[in-house]
Amino acid sequence: MQIIDNIPKFHREPIVVLLLGFITCGLYLIYWNLQASKVFNALAGREIVSSVVAVFAGCIWPVNMYFFFVIGRDGMPALDDRIGEPPRDQSVLLMLLGFFFPMIAAMIVQSEINKLYR
């Protein structure tokens, strides 16, 4: 993984995240959670999601809801600041999607992460 301005490069096509999530029955999302948490921790300049939470989020639904809630509350505003957009709180949307459709929540977050590398 390349590091650009102290932010790890994690560029994936959102559809690939969805397909790999389905093909691997969600196991890919454990890897994806770890990599996304590294990006958001670097963007925030502090640890907003630990590696332990990221791993358990791929295995346990309530933890997955918490993972996406924190990403929406703390990570997305940090990403918006970095790319020059007004900060937005997507915590409730991502938390609900993280419970019912975690692969779609990951697609949304991945599409936002990809904005860093344009």
Image (tube, grey):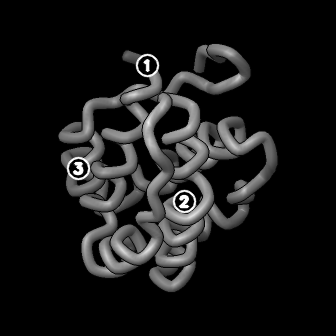
Residue 103 on image: x %, y %? 29, 60
Measured in 3D between alpha carbons, the distance from the residue under mark 1 to the one under mark 2, in whole angstroms, is 19 Å
Which residue lies at the image location 52% right of the left edge and 71% below the top edge?
69
The residue carrying mark 1 is: 117
Q: Residue furthest right?
A: 46
Please tell me which of labels 1 and 2 falls first in the chain: 2
Q: In this view, does 43 lie to the left or right of 28?
A: right
Quarter of the picture holding the C terminus: top left
Q: Which amino acid does label 3 sit on?
A: Leu
For mark 1, give the secondary structure. helix
Q: How far apart are the two marked residues, 2 and 3, measured between alpha carbons?
A: 18 Å
Q: Classify mark 3: residues with Cα within 10 Å, few (<14), some (14-19) or many (20+).
A: some
Residue 90: quarter of image: bottom left
The residue indicated by pointer 3 is 18
Drawn side of residue 46 relative to residue 84, left or right? right
The image shows residue 42 at horizontal and vertical percentages of 71, 36
**Label 2 CA crowd tier, 10 Å (few <14, some 14–19, many 20+):** many
Q: Measuring 49% from the left and 30% from the top, which residue is drawn there?
A: 84
Query: Residue 28, how many percent across, how many down?
Result: 40, 50
**In front here: 109 or 20?**
109
